[in-house]
């Protein structure tokens, strides 16, 4: 059984280790009870490469919200072919989507934070909970450099909400280190990253950013920075 105390102990033990060392420990110690929750981001593509090299049987899943970019769907197929794996894809319940759209409209998430979070909950949080079934550890691609809401993220954390250990092997990586790894290993990635999209989520909620903007500025750009999380990491 995983606990907060165990997460804290493991963070003290592994906080200065390389991403590969962190992954190797967890993939072996929690085999069959660990998975990568991939958004197909640059970070998650790097983690996919590392994981497959350590233990290709590890579960890797993604969430299809129904509002993703075409480039993201193409990347799922490219990733499966490159690594000879099959990403698990979790979808929201159709009935919940129908109820949401009939209540707040197709793009009601633009009007209030509450409506946007309701959309995220149905399209992302509920499918994530189903994906978590049977897990004790989930692997994430969070980096401290990504946003003001992620400055204090640790390598190993206790997720109180989901009662899981969450690990962030790339937490101290810079964007340049991520891109360098991708170039060196010729890892498939979303071409939108070369068009001003450092962070890519649902198509209606993601835009390209200007050179002087924070790298998360293109996500839910109409909201204040402190609100810019969907609920997956809070």
Image: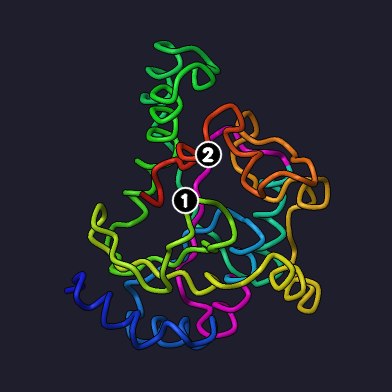
Tell me the element at label 1. helix
Q: Position of residue 22 (x, y in %)?
A: 46, 83
Left or right for 216, reference 111 = right
Left or right for 69, reference 117 = right
Magenta span contains residue 120: no
Tell me the element at label 2. helix
Q: Residue at x 77, y 47 (%)?
A: 192
Q: Residues within 10 Å of mark 2 (few under 14, many from 20)?
A: some
101 shown above or below 23: above
Q: Nearer the viewer, residue 66 or 193?
A: 193
Q: Which image quarter: residue 9?
A: bottom left
55 shown above or below 88: below
Nearer-N-terminus badge (1/2): 1
Count of numbered circles in the view: 2
The N terminus sits in image quarter: bottom left
Q: Position of residue 204 (x, y in %)?
A: 63, 28
Question: Residue 120, which numbered label?
Answer: none
Q: Which image quarter: residue 99?
A: top left
Left or right for 190, reference 156 = right
What span is colored magenta in the figure?
48-70
| Residue that label 1 marks | 149
Q: Are marks 1 and 2 in contact (CB under 8 Å)?
A: yes
Q: Residues within 10 Å of mark 1 (few under 14, many from 20)?
A: some
What is the CA distance from the residue labelled 1 to the residue labelled 2?
A: 8 Å
| Residue that label 2 marks | 225
Magenta span contains residue 64: yes
């Amino acid at each position: 059984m995983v606990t907060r105390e165990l997460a804290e102990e493991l963070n003290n033990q592994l906080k200065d280790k390389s991403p590969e060392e962190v992954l190797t420990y967890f993939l072996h110690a929690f085999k069959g009870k660990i998975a990568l929750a991939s958004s197909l981001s640059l970070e998650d593509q790097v983690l996919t490469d590392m994981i497959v090299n350590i233990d290709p049987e590890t579960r890797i899943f993604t969430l299809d919200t129904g509002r993703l970019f075409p480039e993201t769907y193409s990347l799922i197929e490219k990733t499966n072919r490159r690594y000879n794996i099959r990403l698990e894809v979790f979808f929201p319940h159709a009935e919940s989507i129908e109820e949401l759209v009939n209540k707040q409209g197709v793009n009601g998430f633009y009007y209030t934070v509450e409506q946007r979070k309701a959309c995220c909950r149905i399209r992302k949080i509920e499918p994530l909970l189903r994906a978590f079934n049977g897990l004790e550890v989930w692997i994430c691609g969070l980096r401290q450099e990504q946003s003001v809401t992620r400055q204090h993220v640790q390598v190993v954390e206790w997720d109180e909400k989901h009662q899981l250990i969450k690990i962030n092997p790339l937490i101290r990586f810079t964007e340049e280190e991520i891109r360098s790894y991708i170039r060196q290993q010729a890892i498939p990635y979303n071409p939108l990253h070369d068009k001003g999209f450092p962070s890519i989520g649902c198509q209606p909620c993601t835009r390209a950013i200007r050179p002087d903007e924070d790298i998360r500025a293109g996500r839910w750009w109409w909201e204040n920075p402190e609100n810019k999380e969907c609920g997956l990491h809070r």
